[in-house]
Image (cartoon, rainbow, N blue to C red):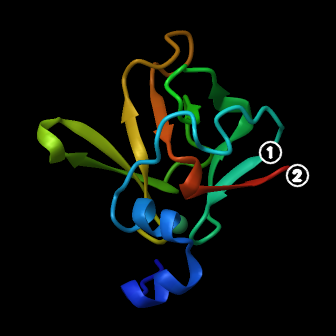
Amino acid sequence: MITKTDEEWKKILTPQQYEILRNKGTEPAFTGQFVDNHEQGVYECAACGEELFDSSTKFESGSGWPSFYDVATQGNVILKDDNAHGMRRTEVVCSKCGGHLGHVFEDGPKNKTGLRYCINSCALKFDNK
Ligand SMILES: [Zn+2]
């Protein structure tokens, strides 16, 4: 588990990354760099490098955010109840640094897990290994 002060995070994250990862912000739909990324590889936490999602589980959700139907490694993401903004949602958090990644919804592909991990591009970095 990585713990840093807000000031330390501000030094290593861009302002937009900080807003999303540390302040639970959301990037505008269809603006993220990975929405239409179809390369094969691994998506890692932009803050700490933890492996989070694999390109093999990425699918076209039409939501405007990168969407995955499963995580790369169980335990690398934590799910938390999120009742902010008058909605009951499930927040997706990096287990290593506690960074906010996005939310998970139950309208994913029915022939897979049925889940849709809706993740901010800004919270990810891509490794096309
Ligand atoms: Zn992280």
Q: Are the residues at dot 2 and dot 1 in contact (C-beta closer than 8 Å)? A: yes
Residue 87 appears in view? yes
Give the x, y percent position of residue 99.
Answer: 43, 64
Residue ID for mark 1: 41
Foreground of the two, 77 or 43: 43
Foreground of the two, 65 or 118: 65
Residue ID for mark 2: 129
- For the point 83% across and 37% down, the residue is 39
Give the x, y percent position of residue 12.
Answer: 58, 81
Q: Is residue 101 left or right of residue 54?
A: left
Residue 99 appears in view? no
- Label 2 Cα crowd, 10 Å radius (few <14 / some 14-19 / many 20+): few
Q: Amino acid at mark 2?
A: Lys
- For the point 46% across and 47% down, the residue is 27
Badge 2 marks a residue whose secondary structure is loop
Q: Is residue 77 left or right of residue 52?
A: left
The quadrant in which residue 106 appears is top left
Badge 1 marks a residue whose secondary structure is loop
